[in-house]
Image: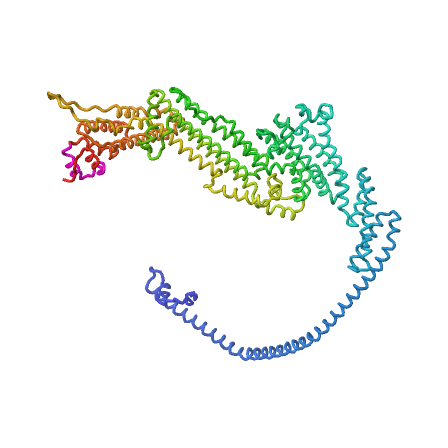
C-alpha cells in the first residue's frame, strides 16, 4: 500500500502527469517491482476516492436536514426585531410629550427662582443697610475705646456694607464719614508704626500692617517705611558736603575766593564707600523685613532704594558733573563739568577732553558694581521689580548717556587736532625733498594714532552705555574719520606745491595744460624751477613721493581692519541685545515660580535697561545691528568713500611726480628747429654719419632706466615677508608700466604737434624714436603701434612712403598716424 499526500491535489496548478512521474520508483528497480508499484498506487487512489465520496455524501445529508431549523430561527428573529422597533417608537413618543410639559414647568420654576433671589438680595441689602446704620452710630464709641484692631474691623464692615448697598443717596454722608474715619485711623496708626519700626518690634509691626491692610491703606505703610529709612541714607549722602566744607579755607567767601584744593575729598573716591554703607543698610533691612513683612519684603526694600535714588537724583547728577570736571585743572578751577562744557557755559576755548569722559566712565563703573550687588541681594524679587530698581540705580547717568554722541564727537575732534598734521611748506632749492619726507612721515605716523583714538572711543561706548549708543558712536566715528581724511587731503595739496605740481592737472596721463596764455607761463615757470633742482634733489622728491603710497596703503589697511572690528563689535551687540530679550523675558519671568529664567536676566544688562523705555531708539539701533550682518555693510560709509578718494589722489600725485621730469624734457619737442632743418651745401662732398639721439630723449631714457632702482626700496618695504614678494614685484612693475605708458603718450602727443619734417629732421626723429623704443624693450615694455608707425614711416625714404602704405596688407601700421607723417613730410597720397 502506498501512502498518498493528498495536499498536492488542492493546488490550482496540479498536473497529473507531473504527479505520476514524481511517484516513480527508483531507477534501479526491476520491471516487476515497477508494475507492482503502479498497481499499489492505483489501488491507493481508488481507496482514497471511495473515502472522499462517502464523507461528502454524509455531510451533504446533514446539511439538508439542518436547513428547516435555520429557516425557522431566521423567521423568529425577524418577528422579535419588529416587536422591538414598535416598543422603541412608543417610548420615544412618550419622551417627546414629557419633554414639552417639563420645559414649561422648568421655565416657571426659573422665574420663581429669580424672584426668590431678588427677594433674598433685597432682604440682604436691607440687613446691610440696617447694619450700616448701626455701625455708623457705634463707630465713634469703638474709636473712643482705643482698640485699633476693632476700629479697623468696624471700618472694613462699613465699607463692605456700603458696597452691598450701592449708590444710595441716603448713605452718601456715610461714605464721606468712612473716608474721614479711615484717614483718622491711619493717623492713629502712624505714631505706633513709627515706634514699632524704630524699635524693631516685629509683632506690633505685623499687627499694624494687618490694620492698614484691613482698611485698604497698605500704601500708607510703604510710604511711612520708605520715609523713615531714607533719612539715614540721606544723612550719609550729606556727609560728603560736610567733608568738602571741612576741607575749604575758613571765611565767608572761601568757596568763591579759592578754587577747590587738590587734597580735598573727591567724589569718585567717596562714592564707593557711600555705596558700601547703603548696601549694608539694605542688607540689614532685607533680613529684618523677611521676618516683619514676609509677604512684602521682596517689593518693600527695593522700593526703599528706588525712592532714595529719586530723592537724591538732582544732587547726584550735579556731583557727577562736578566730579568729571575735577580731573582737569581748567574745569576744576571753574567748578564746572561736562554738562557745562556741552551747554557752552564755559569760557571761550575750553574744550572737553578724554579725561572728562574717562572720569564719568569710572563713576559709572562704580555704580555698575553696586548694581550687581543689588541684583544679588534682591535676587528673590520678581524680574519687573529688579528692572525698575536697577533703572533707578543708573538713572543719574541718563542725562550724560543721552549726550554721549556729542561728547565723543567733541573729544575725538579735539584729540585729532593734537595730532601733528602740518602741511608741507615750500622751502628753498635743496630742501624740498627733506620737507616732503618729513610731511609724509607725519602723515604715516598719524594713521595708527587716529585708529587708536577710534578704538578707544568704541571701548568707552561699551563701558559707559553697554552699546545702547552704538548708533550715535557710528555717526561720530564716521564724521571724525571724514574730518581726518579731509585734513590728509589738504596736506596732500601742500605736497603738490612742494613737488612743483601746482599747475598740473591729471587726467589721462597727459598734461591738460595748453601752451597758451597764463598756462604757458606757469608751465615755463615750473620748468625753470625744476631746472634749478639738482638730480640728487630730484630723486629725493621722487623717493618722498613714492613714500606717500605707504600712507595710502596704511590708511586703507588700517581703516579696513578697524571697520571689520567695528562690525564684529556690532555683531556681538546684536547677540546680547536681541529683540527676544525685550519681547519675551519679562513675560516668561512672570509665569515662573521664584527665580527668573536666564533669558529674563539678560534684560538686566545696562543697555537693555535703557532700551526698554525708549522703543524708538531700540528700533533704530536694531535696524543698524541687522544691517551690520550684511557682508556689504559699511560701518563708516562716508569715511570708506573718502579713503578710496584719498588713495586715488595719492596715486595721482605719485604719478604726476614720476612723470614730471618726462613732461619737462618733452615739453618743447614739437618745436625743435632740427625738424625743419636742411643740410647746408658744401664745396666738397663730405662723408655722411649716422644721427645720434638728441639730449631730450637720452635724458628721458636714462630716467626710465633708473626708475626701477628708485622703486626697489619701496617694493622691499612692502615685501617684508616672503608671502608679499610677488605683490611687491607686481607693485614695481605696475608703476613702471604706468610711467612708461605716460612717457610714450606724452612723446606721441609732441610728435603729433610737429608741423614739418625735412629729410634730415625725419632721419633725426627716427633715430630718437628708435632709441626710446630700444629702452622700452629693455624694460620689457610693449612698443605702442602708434610709435612703431612713426618709426617705420620716418625711416622710410620720402619717395617710398606711398608704396609703404599701399603694401601694408597685414595692417601693421596705424593708418591715421601714417597719414599724419605723410602730411608732415609733405607727401601727397592723392596720386
Q: Nearer the viewer, residue 78 or 139?
A: 139
- Left or right: 267 as drawn, with respect to 521: right
Please, is residue 6 above or below residue 668 in the view? below
**Dominant secondary structure (helix, strand or loop) of the stretch shown in magenta:** helix
Q: How is the image coloured?
A: rainbow
| Residue 802 among those drawn in magenta | yes
Q: Whole-percent x and y of residue 289?
A: 75, 40
In the foreground, 557 or 352: 352
Q: Horizontally, is 107 left or right of 553 in the view?
A: right
The N terminus - image quarter: bottom left
Quadrant in the picture for residue 208: top right
Measured as percent of width and height from the top left, residue 136 is found at 85, 55
Residue 647: in magenta span:
no
Q: Position of residue 457 (x, y in %)?
A: 54, 33
| Identity of the residue furthest to the front in this view | 517
Magenta segment boundaries in residue numbering:
798-817
Q: Could you say where residue 825 lies in the image, as x and y percent from the top left?
A: 18, 33
Residue 722 visible (yes or no): yes
Q: Residue furthest left?
A: 684
Look at the picture and state if 41 lies above or below 641: below
Amino acid at each position: 500500500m502506498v501512502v498518498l499526500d493528498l495536499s498536492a491535489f488542492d493546488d490550482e496548478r496540479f498536473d497529473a502527469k507531473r504527479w505520476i512521474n514524481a511517484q516513480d520508483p527508483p531507477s534501479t528497480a526491476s520491471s516487476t517491482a515497477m508494475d507492482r508499484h503502479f498497481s499499489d498506487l492505483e489501488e491507493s487512489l481508488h481507496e482514497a476516492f471511495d473515502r472522499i465520496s462517502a464523507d461528502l455524501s454524509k455531510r451533504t445529508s446533514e446539511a439538508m436536514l439542518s436547513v428547516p431549523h435555520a429557516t425557522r430561527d431566521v423567521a423568529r428573529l425577524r418577528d422579535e426585531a419588529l416587536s422591538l422597533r414598535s416598543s422603541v417608537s412608543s417610548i420615544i413618543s412618550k419622551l417627546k410629550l414629557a419633554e414639552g410639559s417639563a420645559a414649561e414647568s422648568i421655565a416657571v420654576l426659573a422665574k420663581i427662582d429669580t424672584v426668590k433671589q431678588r427677594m433674598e438680595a433685597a432682604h440682604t441689602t436691607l440687613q446691610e443697610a440696617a447694619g450700616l446704620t448701626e455701625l455708623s452710630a457705634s463707630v465713634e464709641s469703638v474709636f473712643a475705646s482705643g482698640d485699633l484692631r476693632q476700629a479697623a474691623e468696624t471700618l472694613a464692615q462699613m465699607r463692605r456694607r456700603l458696597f452691598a448697598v450701592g449708590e444710595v443717596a441716603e448713605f452718601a454722608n456715610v461714605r464721606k464719614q468712612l473716608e474721614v474715619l479711615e484717614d483718622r485711623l491711619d493717623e492713629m496708626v502712624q505714631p505706633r508704626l513709627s515706634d514699632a519700626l524704630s524699635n524693631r518690634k516685629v509683632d506690633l509691626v505685623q499687627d499694624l500692617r494687618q490694620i492698614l491692610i484691613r482698611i485698604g491703606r497698605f500704601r500708607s505703610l510703604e510710604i511711612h517705611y520708605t520715609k523713615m529709612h531714607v533719612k539715614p541714607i540721606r544723612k550719609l549722602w550729606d556727609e560728603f558736603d560736610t567733608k568738602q566744607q571741612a576741607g575749604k579755607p575758613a571765611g565767608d567767601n572761601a568757596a568763591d575766593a579759592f578754587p577747590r584744593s587738590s587734597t580735598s575729598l573727591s567724589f569718585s573716591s567717596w562714592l564707593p564707600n557711600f555705596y558700601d554703607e547703603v548696601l549694608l543698610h539694605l542688607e540689614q533691612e532685607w533680613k529684618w523685613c523677611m521676618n516683619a513683612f514676609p509677604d512684602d519684603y521682596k517689593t518693600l526694600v527695593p522700593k526703599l532704594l528706588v525712592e532714595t535714588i529719586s530723592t537724591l537724583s538732582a544732587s547726584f547728577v550735579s556731583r557727577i558733573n562736578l566730579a568729571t570736571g575735577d580731573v582737569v585743572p581748567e574745569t576744576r578751577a571753574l567748578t564746572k563739568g561736562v554738562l557745562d562744557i556741552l551747554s557752552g557755559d564755559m569760557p571761550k576755548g575750553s574744550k572737553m577732553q578724554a579725561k572728562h569722559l574717562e572720569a564719568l566712565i569710572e563713576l559709572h563703573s562704580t555704580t555698575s558694581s553696586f548694581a550687581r550687588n543689588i541684583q544679588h541681594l534682591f535676587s528673590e524679587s520678581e524680574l519687573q521689580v529688579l528692572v525698575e530698581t536697577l533703572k533707578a540705580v543708573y538713572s543719574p547717568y541718563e542725562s550724560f548717556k543721552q549726550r554721549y554722541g556729542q561728547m565723543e564727537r567733541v573729544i575725538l575732534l579735539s584729540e585729532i587736532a593734537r595730532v601733528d598734521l602740518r602741511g608741507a611748506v615750500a622751502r628753498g632749492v635743496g630742501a624740498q625733498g627733506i620737507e616732503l619726507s618729513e610731511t609724509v612721515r607725519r602723515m604715516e605716523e598719524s594713521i595708527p594714532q587716529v585708529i587708536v583714538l577710534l578704538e578707544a572711543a568704541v571701548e568707552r561706548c561699551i563701558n559707559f552705555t553697554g552699546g545702547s549708543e552704538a548708533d550715535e558712536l557710528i555717526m561720530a566715528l564716521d564724521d571724525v574719520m571724514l574730518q581726518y581724511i579731509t585734513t590728509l587731503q589738504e596736506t596732500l595739496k601742500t605736497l603738490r606745491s612742494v613737488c612743483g605740481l601746482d599747475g598740473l592737472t591729471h587726467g589721462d596721463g597727459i598734461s591738460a595744460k595748453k601752451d597758451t596764455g597764463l598756462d604757458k607761463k606757469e608751465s615755463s615757470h615750473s620748468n625753470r624751477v625744476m631746472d634749478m633742482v639738482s638730480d640728487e634733489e630730484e630723486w629725493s622728491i621722487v623717493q618722498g613721493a613714492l613714500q606717500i603710497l605707504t600712507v595710502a596703503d596704511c590708511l586703507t589697511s588700517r581703516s579696513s581692519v578697524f571697520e571689520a572690528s567695528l562690525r564684529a563689535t556690532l555683531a556681538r551687540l546684536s547677540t546680547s541685545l536681541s529683540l527676544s530679550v525685550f519681547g519675551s523675558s519679562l513675560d516668561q519671568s512672570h509665569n515662573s515660580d521664584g527665580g527668573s529664567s536666564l533669558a529674563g536676566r539678560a534684560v538686566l544688562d545696562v543697555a537693555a535697561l535703557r532700551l526698554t523705555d525708549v522703543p524708538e531708539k531700540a528700533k533704530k539701533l536694531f535696524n543698524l545691528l541687522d544691517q551690520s550682518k550684511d557682508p556689504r555693510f559699511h560701518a563708516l560709509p562716508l569715511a570708506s568713500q573718502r579713503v578710496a578718494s584719498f588713495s586715488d589722489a595719492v596715486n595721482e600725485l605719485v604719478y604726476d611726480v614720476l612723470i614730471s621730469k618726462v613732461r619737462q624734457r618733452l615739453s618743447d619737442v614739437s618745436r625743435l628747429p632740427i625738424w625743419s632743418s636742411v643740410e647746408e651745401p658744401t664745396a666738397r662732398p663730405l662723408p655722411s654719419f649716422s644721427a645720434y639721439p638728441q639730449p631730450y630723449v637720452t635724458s628721458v631714457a636714462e630716467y626710465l632706466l633708473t626708475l626701477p632702482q628708485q622703486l626697489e626700496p619701496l617694493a622691499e618695504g612692502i615685501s617684508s615677508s616672503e608671502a608679499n614678494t610677488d605683490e611687491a614685484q607686481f607693485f614695481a612693475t605696475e608703476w613702471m608700466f604706468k610711467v612708461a605708458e605716460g612717457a610714450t603718450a606724452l612723446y606721441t602727443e609732441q610728435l603729433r604737434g610737429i608741423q614739418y619734417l625735412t629729410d634730415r629732421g625725419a632721419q633725426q626723429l627716427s633715430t630718437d624714436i628708435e632709441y626710446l623704443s630700444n629702452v622700452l624693450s629693455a624694460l620689457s615694455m610693449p612698443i605702442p603701434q602708434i610709435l612703431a608707425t612713426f618709426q617705420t614711416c620716418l625711416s622710410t625714404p620720402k619717395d617710398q612712403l606711398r608704396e609703404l602704405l599701399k603694401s601694408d596688407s597685414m595692417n601693421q601700421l596705424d593708418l591715421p598716424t601714417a597719414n599724419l607723417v605723410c602730411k608732415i613730410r609733405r607727401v601727397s597720397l592723392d596720386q
